[in-house]
Image (cartoon, rainbow, N blue to C red):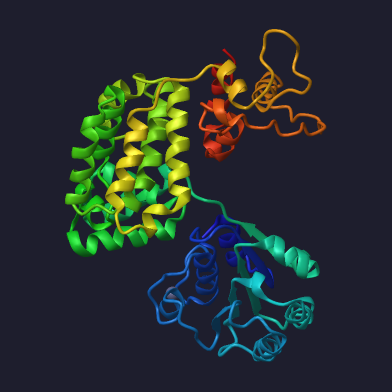
Amino acid sequence: MGSTLRSAVEGGRVAHAYLLSGPRGVGKTTTARLLAMALNCPDRTDGEPCGVCASCEPIWAGKSTMDVVEMDGASNRGVDDARDLRERAMYAATREDRYRVFILDEAHMLTTEAWNALLKLIEEPPPRLILAFATTEPQKIEQTASPIISRCQTFEFRRVADADIRERLRQILEREGVEAERQALRTIAAQADGGVRDALSLTDQVLSFSGDSLTSRDVDRILGLVPEERYLELLELMAARDRAGVFEYAKGLLDDGLDPAQFLRGLGEALRAAMVLKLAPRSDLAAVRDDLRDRFQVAADAASPADWMRRMAAASDFDASGVLGRTARPRIHLEVLLLRLVSMESTVSLEEVLSALGAPRMEGHDPPEPGPVERSAAKTAAAAVPPPAAKPAPEPELDRGRVTFEQVSPEATLKKLDPRFAAAKAILDLEFRD
Ligand SMILES: [Zn+2]
């Protein structure tokens, strides 16, 4: 529980209504529960609940009690539900020194009428009543019930950084006497994508099979992930442009029962790692295993950043097409993708791109309107300053006969990329301009 809430509990200065907002799995409901526990725990120390007493335990488990009620806004969203809640909230707590706490999850699902029914309760709350609204979409509440928001004390929750999740898992596991490999924690943190709750439940999932140790191997196997070595092998095939090796590689994946869709998700990460290593050798941001780092670096150095970007775009297009989820013959589709990735030719020049887009050729007369590539290059020159609202140029007609750049403008390709590549974008724009 945050220090603000802790000292509010300790000093008896709790608000009547809280709005807890943030992405899923980052601790909104947990915080509301901890607040309810702390307010009612007879063994509280420094504003922290004991967590194990008869009052704390059911609240922690999410069970509604006479005093602490958890509700889901999605299934209690109407005005009748709100009136019902209002009536129940008027009852005093079971004991004079206790608080009643209503925790309403997914609060953005409530209708405007429901909020109106709750407004009076929030404006003139009975003593020792706390309302905690948890939501992933506070802007919706702002739209339907802005007077409510202004009467709530607001806490914004953010995704937790990978390193913090790893550290928290490490501490928890150490306390439990579980030995954990660094790589295992890294994989779990990456899978949890900023959600502590997801990280904990993935860890539980692995431990329920593996017992009292957490190895990278077990994590990959139990979560159905493709081991990092596999991706490295593929990057090495790309580095060597070894087309023949693709068939053996795809066979190996399928023989081992690895899920092609899962493979594709990890592929994006592996290509990203290659890109990062190419742009910033030995960078920690590449998130590759320490013992494989040197081999990853060698493979990454074998192609240009633009090539890695095109491979990333090809893999992401393939992923977006969803074909692997629909096909009865994933092997063929997988092989086609892998062959494309392995045999991609090196970067095309700007001239070729322009000609593929049907823009006038550079020599001779000037183009009347800048093409997408030039616009993108100009943007780089303007650095982070957003461009003025330019008059949109008419889309140049594609000259089908001469298309060599996969009929995708670099701009469109870049847009598809993860925002993490903002820095790479600038460098790539330069590369395209050369
Ligand atoms: Zn307690």
Residue 297 locus on image (x, y percent)? 32, 23
Whether residue 280 is visible: no
Q: Please identify the quadrant where the C terminus is shown.
A: top right
- Side of 358 where 336 appears, left or right: left
Residue 17 locus on image (x, y percent)? 68, 71
Q: Residue at x 75, y 18 (%)?
A: 367
Q: Nearer the viewer, residue 71 or 68?
A: 71
Give the image quarter of residue 334.
Answer: top left
Q: Residue at x 61, y 63 (%)?
A: 20
Residue 67 locus on image (x, y percent)? 55, 85
Q: Quadrant of ligand 1?
A: bottom left
Q: Is residue 256 placed above or below 290 in the rendered structure? A: below
Q: Is residue 137 placed above or below 343 in the rendered structure? A: below
Q: Is residue 210 placed above or below 413 in the rendered structure? A: below
- Side of 240 where 162 appears, left or right: right
Q: Nearer the viewer, residue 3 or 358?
A: 358
> How many numbered callouts?
0
Q: Residue at x 25, y 27 (%)?
A: 242
Q: Residue furthest front?
A: 401
Q: Nearer the viewer, residue 121 or 341?
A: 341
Q: Residue at x 39, y 40 (%)?
A: 269
Residue 277 locus on image (x, y percent)? 39, 25
Q: Is residue 275 placed above or below 145 in the rendered structure? A: above
